[in-house]
Amino acid sequence: MGFLKNFFNLSKPIPPQQTRPFSIFRVDGNASVTDADSAMRHTTVFACVQAIANKLGSVTLNIYRKQNSIRQIASKHPLYKLLKNKPNPNLTRFDFIRMIMQDILLRGNHYSQIVKNNRGEAIGLYPLFADNMEVKARTNGEAVYIYKTKNKKYLLENNEVLHIKGLPDPSGLKGLNPIEYNRRAIELSKTTEQFGLNFFKNGANGSGILQHPGVLSDAAYERLKKEFEKAYTGLANSGKPIILEEGLKYEPLSLSNEDSQFLETRRYQKADIAALFQVPLYMLGDMSKTTFSNMEQMSINFVQNTLLPHAVNIELVMYNKLLNETEQEEGYYIKFNLNSLMRGDFKTRTDGYKTMVNIGAITPNEVRELEDFNPAGTEADELYMQMNMTTLKKIAKDENGKNKN
């Protein structure tokens, strides 16, 4: 009976844990960046992570099989539904990819438990909190994972964890934490935000100097300070006339409108953080250097230089962790379809399709599939080429024939 129990037993996912308390409305006046959560409270950091995670999450992820140069979607493979639709009962593929990207961009590492059935096939991918994971190396160099929850520790073997690293550390066991390495830049930007917040809370009024002809006693000084702050600081008191007594004079310190808005400083800080995540500024709402003609090229650069490396990273880890050696030898592989993000405007696409069809590179039905149209019949499965085209070898042969005649 014990044998049967072990034989039919499926591996179980680690019970989900509650995250630590997090309030998006918390304002602590502290610009320090201690972890991923504090970094995400910065508008530009949040926008960069959201831009990358949402864009890659919207791309189709499939398992394919290539045989005799023919590539087909492996819709019968157990991983097909897992990758295309739902990695586990609680997550869609869109949310799963977004969770991967959040972990990589903010913590440098993503971990998911690979739950398998008794045949060794992956039947579920369950994200784990990166902050709770410890990675060690066995004597043979293979990684082993120790996952800590509130009441328990779990030992997970290398083949039980989908570990996707960002930029690897020198040991190769973990990814470098990008927030730790760029804390100063984010803190500087948060300090600018905090300064602006405090400034506008004071009604966008600069500081000033109160002059008294005599010498105030300590009690009079404290009373004046308290009453002046209560009556004339804060947004609600902005614009009130200042009433002074006993020969007091108020001399405001001049502060230009450009100084009060911190436009140049904030724009520079936004660009600095955007460079860290490799996100174009127009995706963060800054259109100052964007034109209609260059926006498409910047979008293509974003796909090639930002999304593509992340996609390849995820594909390779999934290939090595989710497919066994037999499946790899049989031509199975996992791939994002980034072509949908490289399509450009309608005229550019149609000109490209026309060229590809005219040189016999793709069929009309393949064009229709790229545009999400239904097939147009078996005739549209044929490759076409213009009749006035030929090979250089045939031209030379015809010329030799003419010369002989």
Image: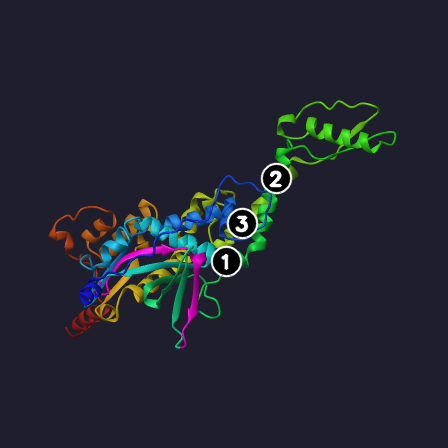
Q: In which quarter of the image is residue 130?
A: bottom left
State the residue in front, 144 or 1.
1
Q: In this view, does 286 lie above or below 14?
A: above
Q: Which image quarter holds the C terminus?
A: bottom left
| Span highlighted in magenta in the image | 118-139
Is 127 displayed left or right of 228 in the figure? left
Give percent across and percent down for residue 97.
35, 53
Residue under pointer 3: 271
Mark 1: amino acid: Pro
* Residue at the image point whose x is 57% and y is 48% from the top: 269
Residue under pointer 2: 196
* Residue at the image point whose x is 78% and y is 23% from the top: 244
Is 330 displayed left or right of 246 in the figure? left
Return the residue found at the far front: 1
* Residue at the image point whose x is 67% and y is 32% from the top: 205
**Sequence order check, earlier mark of 1 and 3:** 1
Mark 2 against mark 3, which lies toward the viewer?
A: 2
State the residue in front, 301 or 405.
301
Mark 3: amino acid: Ala
Is 235 displayed left or right of 349 in the figure? right
Badge 3: residue crowd in 10 Å (few <14, some 14–19, many ≥20): some
Q: Is the residue under label 3 in contact with that under label 1 (CB below 8 Å)?
A: no
Specify the label residue 265 is tagged with: none
Residue under pointer 1: 178
State the residue in front, 193 or 141.
141
